[in-house]
Image (cartoon, grey):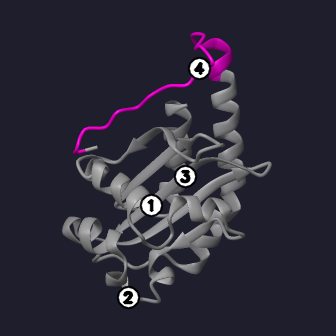
Amino acid sequence: PNVLRSEILTPVRIRIPTAAYFLAAADTATLLFTGAIVDEILEHVTPQFIENEFLHEDVNKFSWLARSATPVGGLIQATHGQLKQSTRYREILAPLALGDELRAALITGGACWGFLCLHRYQSSPHFTPAEVAFIGRLTTHMAAGLRKALLLGGLIGAQVPDEPGLLLLAEDL
């Protein structure tokens, strides 16, 4: 799945210039991330993103996009041009000199298989409606690829018992 995620990002980033990216596979039942590739710029703030995503109110949450009729959203549109309305922008993106953010839920067959997030620097133009529409046209295809990679990986990977698990997080997530 990591190879596929890298391969998905290459043509997307050629067509849509970005400063940073995040692409994750997701559990279709819980919408929790099951694996991700993250740009270096975002790596050290991953705990802050996770805290924002699951513990704070904000716009364009991945779970909201996954349940929405429109699974793609730009931060500039969601905040009506006022990025500072977003806690994620104020506390995470602005200190990194990042501006607009484009998020997408990757859905096929009624199930969300992953999430994509692209970022631009504050000094760069916002994502255009054409770029948002382009990502919107790709989401089903990206989801189908993630689904197939996960299913095929499960066939050739080690057998994992079908039992409940437990995940413990430290204070820093």
Q: CA distance from mark 4 to mark 1?
A: 35 Å
Q: Among all residues in the image, which is located at the extreme right?
A: 109
Q: CA distance from mark 4 to mark 2?
A: 45 Å
Q: What is the secondary structure assignment of the residue under circle 3?
A: strand
Estimate how packed mark 3 is, as few (under 14), some (14 to 19) or many (20 or more) residues with alpha carbons within 10 Å.
Answer: many
Q: Disc 4 marks which residue?
A: 163
Amino acid type at image mark 3: Phe
x then y, percent, for residue 47? 29, 49
Instruction: Determine whether 137 is above or below 5 in the image.
Output: below
**Front residue of this view, candidates 36 and 3:** 36
Amino acid type at image mark 1: Leu
Q: Disc 2 marks which residue?
A: 82
Q: Which residue: 65% across, 43% down?
A: 28
Task: Look at the image and give the residue range highlighted in magenta.
Answer: 153-172
Q: Disc 3 marks which residue?
A: 115
Amino acid type at image mark 4: Glu
Query: Which quarter of the rendering shows the N terminus?
Result: top right
Q: Disc 1 marks which residue?
A: 118
Q: Earlier in the sequence, mark 3 or mark 2?
A: 2
- Magenta stretch: helix, strand or loop mostly: loop
Q: CA distance from mark 3 to mark 2?
A: 24 Å
Q: Earlier in the sequence, mark 4 or mark 2?
A: 2
Q: CA distance from mark 2 to mark 1?
A: 18 Å
x then y, percent, for residue 80? 47, 89
x then y, percent, for residue 146? 63, 38
